[in-house]
Image (tube, rainbow, N blue to C red):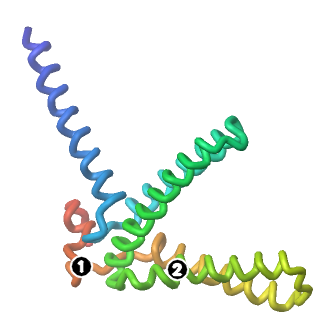
Amino acid sequence: MASARLFRRGGARAIVRAKEADVDLASLLLRFDGRINRAKYWLATVIYATVNLLLALLDRIWDQSVGFAALSFVINLGVFVSGLAVGTKRLHDRDRSAWWLLFFYLLPAVLLGWILVDVEVGSTVMLRYVSLFLALLIIWIWQVVELGCLRGTVGPNAYGPDPLAAQGRPQ
């Protein structure tokens, strides 16, 4: 009888913790306000990579399916918006404006588009390809370092409290 009560109490706590984790995950992926630490940024990155891997595998199964293409578009749009939310909060942790996302996300897309258009047109200017590719690579490396490797601002900043201090970790 006592063990059954203990199990029920432990089970209730586990359900509450699971619900808190759901809210935390939804907040991580969908809210644009506040700050997140590097660990949560990488958790979101793993989630996005897993979603894209699953979509790629399903694409192989449902080859050329219009329905799957529409579903894939909607899911990728959700991942994109969620990526903007996660990137915004990570930049806020670094005490930077979300406008930096234009540099980290839009500029590489423009450079990649430029390279692809040049290839399609049949341009043979190798120096331009190499220059654009190096610029693209530098921006991607900077993005990984800035968002994924560097510690956020210690203590509160204009965007909210330190997420590591909120977890009771030493600063």
Q: Amino acid at mark 1?
A: Tyr
Classify residue 83 as left or right of residue 49: left
Indicate whether 86 appears above or below 94: above
Q: Which quadrant of the structure image shows residue 90?
A: bottom left
The percent coordinates of residue 142 (x first, y second) are: 56, 81
Can the viewer see residue 60 in this picture?
yes
The percent coordinates of residue 164 (x first, y second) are: 27, 66
**Which mark identifies residue 104?**
2
Residue placed most toward the observer, 25 or 37? 25
Residue placed most toward the observer, 13 or 54? 54
Q: Amino acid at mark 2?
A: Phe
| Mark 1, secondary structure of its residue | loop
Residue placed most toward the observer, 154 or 58? 58
Indicate whether 111 appears above or below 40: below
Q: How far apart in space, not on screen, are marks 2 and 1 (Cα)?
A: 20 Å
Can the viewer see residue 50 in this picture?
no
Q: Which quadrant of the structure image shows residue 6?
A: top left
| Mark 2, secondary structure of its residue | helix
Residue at the spot 61% in from the left edge and 48% down from the top edge: 69
The percent coordinates of residue 155 (x first, y second) are: 22, 78
